[in-house]
Image (cartoon, rainbow, N blue to C red):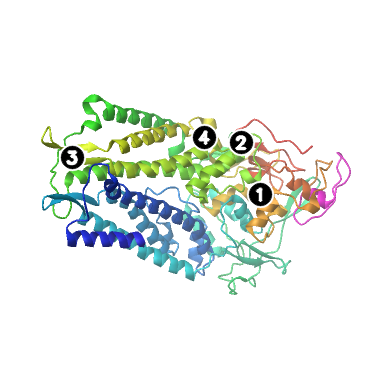
């Protein structure tokens, strides 16, 4: 708001007084104020605007899931939890009944052009024999209009959010937060079958028919056990029993429509179903992949090895061309070059040459920034799967609790360094470097009158150009950090579906929709049979602090030392005693201790709660089950000694 008022005041004052400040020399403090400072502030606002969009993306699906409209809720489970980039606007929220959010995203996308426009918003004009700085009226008022639209859309967004409830206890920034939300859900099987569909609309219609919602729920057999989760009416709650050393799923009664939302006090019987309707419409062209070949992997196309190599080679070649053209004696920037365009500045402050040589370089720098930011956002999101796929797996603070997708740029770099994720730290820091490119590129060229030649030539502000050269070099070299081998890319990829078989059985799995890992249903596909959902760490924590404490440290009452028996079945709500051949029976507190101590998590093949093999996320040192085979590694997790 303050910046908008300053721009309006500058535009009006310049028009009324035919100038703002007398011109000094190329590169002085006044040159910085008019050529670099406006676009620098504009870029800072743009980065903050991106952070707001990331936060809105994260809560928008839950706003939809807490609404009264079954159609909005059916769209909510498919809305992206995090953006994949800002090169183009997101339009999915209009269909989800969130026009305020959709409009805000479109206006925010339009505001990416404010940075190159601000670099051309001021020029120098000769009046009464002296040169003065003045505002370029057409350009600066375009920026003002864009900021006014942004202000209006932001006010509308805040008013919309003020009247809505998210249904959340806290901001879900990590996989652990989603595990808490899904721990008691009766929709895990329905969402896990998402990859069997070949049409998103078919899946959405089933969600709308069930009336899925995020709320406080209770089941008929445990009316006092109220859970905050994603649920639906008349859908069976899965339960399990122990048969030997395996978990076997058994039937459970459905949720009743007497459940209600404790936050708002309104009932959640938005519609009833006598039974779950589940018919997958599969296309005849859907490919069938033998289970022995393993699940397919999803990776954004621009991060696949072929494209990663292409980006790196292209960046290096363009960097070499830039250096040759900029510093070769015949074409050196410091000697200047002819504008080849009309030079005179009109009374409104517009000059075609200064506009071209400020706007175009700044726009190119902006495109470099936006493209790299897209890579950064996706690498941050996929860092979770890379950590879970690493040899030896990862502890909770370096996997389940990672919040790179929700953190600011500098925060991501610091956290990634602490977690020893050097690739992510450097990539995120490169985004900050890329953010300076449109600012420097927009002010580095300037029309100057050369007395010896009696000609106007485009000169370069050399201190800024040297800095630009260094930053462009770092930017181009950063493309070498992308995963360029199949083994590296496999670590950052996501299984497109859950590949399952009965133990010792050979079956085929049909693959339909890909798993991008960006929506609730896609997250469920990786954890729906995981025993993480029955771990006490995720059972109704009162706050995120309590959740983090549970995952990182064991309660004082449970620090009893390492247990001797490695084969203890950890079953939800069962404080049983299990006797194995490896040693005597153990108590429930010892079982809980094993769940906390040295817990490591991985992404690979694991034994699900129904006794079948799945591909997804689970604890590696899970006791009483088969060892977990991690992706991207030949190592097999061992039992706890």
Q: Residues within 10 Å of mark 3 (few under 14, many from 20)?
A: some
| Helix, strand or loop status at disc 2 | loop
Q: Residues within 10 Å of mark 4 (few under 14, many from 20)?
A: many
Residue 171 coordinates in the image, percent (x, y): 56, 58
**Compared with residue 626, is residue 556 higher up or lower down, i.e. above or below?**
below
Residue identifier under label 1 = 529
**Compared with residue 165, is residue 439 higher up or lower down, i.e. above or below?**
above
Q: Earlier in the sequence, mark 4 or mark 2?
A: 2
- Magenta residues span 570-591
Residue identifier under label 2 = 390
Q: CA distance from mark 4 to mark 2?
A: 12 Å
Give the left or right position of residue 401, taking residue 554 as reference: left
Q: CA distance from mark 1 to mark 2?
A: 21 Å
| Helix, strand or loop status at disc 3 | strand
Residue 503 coordinates in the image, percent (x, y): 70, 40
Q: Nearer the viewer, mark 2 or mark 3?
A: 3
Residue identifier under label 4 = 489
Q: Earlier in the sequence, mark 4 or mark 1?
A: 4
Give the left or right position of residue 353, taking residue 31 as reference: left
């Amino acid at each position: 708001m303050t910046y908008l008022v300053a721009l309006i005041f500058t535009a009006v004052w310049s028009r009324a007084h035919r100038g703002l400040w007398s011109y000094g020399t190329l590169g002085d403090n006044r040159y910085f104020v008019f050529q670099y400072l406006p676009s620098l502030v504009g870029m800072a606002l743009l980065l903050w605007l991106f952070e707001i969009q990331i936060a809105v993306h994260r809560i928008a699906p839950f706003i939809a899931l807490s609404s009264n409209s079954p159609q909005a809720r059916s769209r909510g489970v498919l809305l992206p939890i995090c953006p994949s980039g800002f090169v183009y606007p997101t339009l999915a929220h209009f269909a989800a009944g969130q026009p305020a959010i959709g409009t805000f995203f479109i206006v925010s996308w339009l505001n990416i052009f404010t940075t190159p426009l601000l670099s051309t918003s001021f020029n120098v004009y000769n009046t009464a024999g002296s040169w003065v700085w003045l505002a370029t009226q057409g350009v600066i008022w375009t920026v003002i209009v864009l900021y006014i639209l942004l202000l209006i859309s932001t006010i509308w967004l805040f008013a919309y959010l003020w009247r809505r409830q998210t249904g959340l206890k806290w901001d879900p920034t990590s996989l652990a937060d989603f595990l808490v939300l899904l721990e008691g859900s009766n929709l895990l099987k329905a969402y896990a079958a998402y990859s069997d569909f070949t049409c998103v609309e078919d899946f959405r219609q089933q969600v709308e028919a069930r009336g899925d919602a995020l709320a406080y729920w209770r089941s008929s057999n445990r009316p006092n056990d109220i859970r905050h989760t994603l649920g639906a009416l008349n859908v069976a709650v899965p339960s399990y029993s122990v048969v030997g050393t395996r978990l076997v799923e058994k039937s459970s009664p459905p949720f009743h429509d007497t459940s209600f939302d404790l936050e708002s006090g309104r009932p959640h019987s938005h519609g009833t179903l006598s039974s779950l309707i589940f018919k997958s419409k599969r296309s005849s062209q859907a490919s069938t992949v033998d289970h022995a070949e393993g699940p397919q992997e999803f990776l954004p196309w621009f991060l696949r090895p072929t494209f990663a190599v292409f980006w790196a080679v292209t960046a290096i070649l363009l960097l070499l061309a830039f250096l040759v053209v900029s510093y070769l004696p015949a074409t050196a920037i410091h000697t200047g070059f002819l504008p080849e365009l009309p030079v005179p500045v009109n009374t409104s402050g517009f000059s075609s040459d200064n506009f071209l040589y400020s706007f175009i370089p700044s726009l190119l720098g902006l495109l470099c920034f936006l493209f790299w930011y897209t890579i950064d956002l996706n690498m941050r999101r996929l860092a979770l799967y890379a950590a879970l796929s690493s040899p030896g797996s990862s502890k909770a603070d370096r996997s389940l609790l990672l919040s790179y997708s929700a953190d600011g740029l500098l925060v991501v770099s610091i956290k990634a360094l602490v977690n020893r994720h050097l690739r992510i730290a450097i990539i995120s820091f490169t985004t900050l470097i890329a953010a300076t490119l449109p600012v420097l590129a927009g002010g580095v060229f300037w029309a100057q009158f050369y007395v010896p030649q009696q000609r106007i030539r485009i000169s370069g502000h050399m201190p800024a150009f040297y800095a630009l050269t260094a930053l462009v070099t770092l930017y181009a070299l950063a493309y070498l950090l992308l995963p360029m081998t199949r083994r590296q890319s496999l670590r950052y990829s996501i299984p497109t579906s859950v590949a399952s078989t009965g133990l010792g059985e050979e079956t085929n799995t049909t693959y339909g929709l890909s798993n991008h890992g960006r929506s609730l249903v896609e997250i469920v596909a990786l954890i729906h049979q995981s025993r993480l959902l029955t771990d006490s760490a995720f059972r109704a924590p009162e706050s995120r602090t309590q959740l983090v404490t549970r995952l990182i440290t064991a309660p004082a009452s449970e620090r009893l030392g390492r247990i001797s028996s490695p084969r203890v079945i950890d079953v939800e709500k069962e404080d049983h005693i299990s006797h194995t051949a490896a040693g005597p029976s153990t108590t429930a507190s010892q079982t809980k201790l094993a769940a906390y101590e040295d817990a490591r998590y991985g992404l690979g093949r694991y034994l699900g709660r129904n006794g079948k093999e799945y591909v997804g996320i689970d604890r590696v040192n899970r006791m009483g089950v088969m060892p977990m085979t991690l992706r991207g590694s030949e190592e097999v997790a061992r039992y706890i000694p």
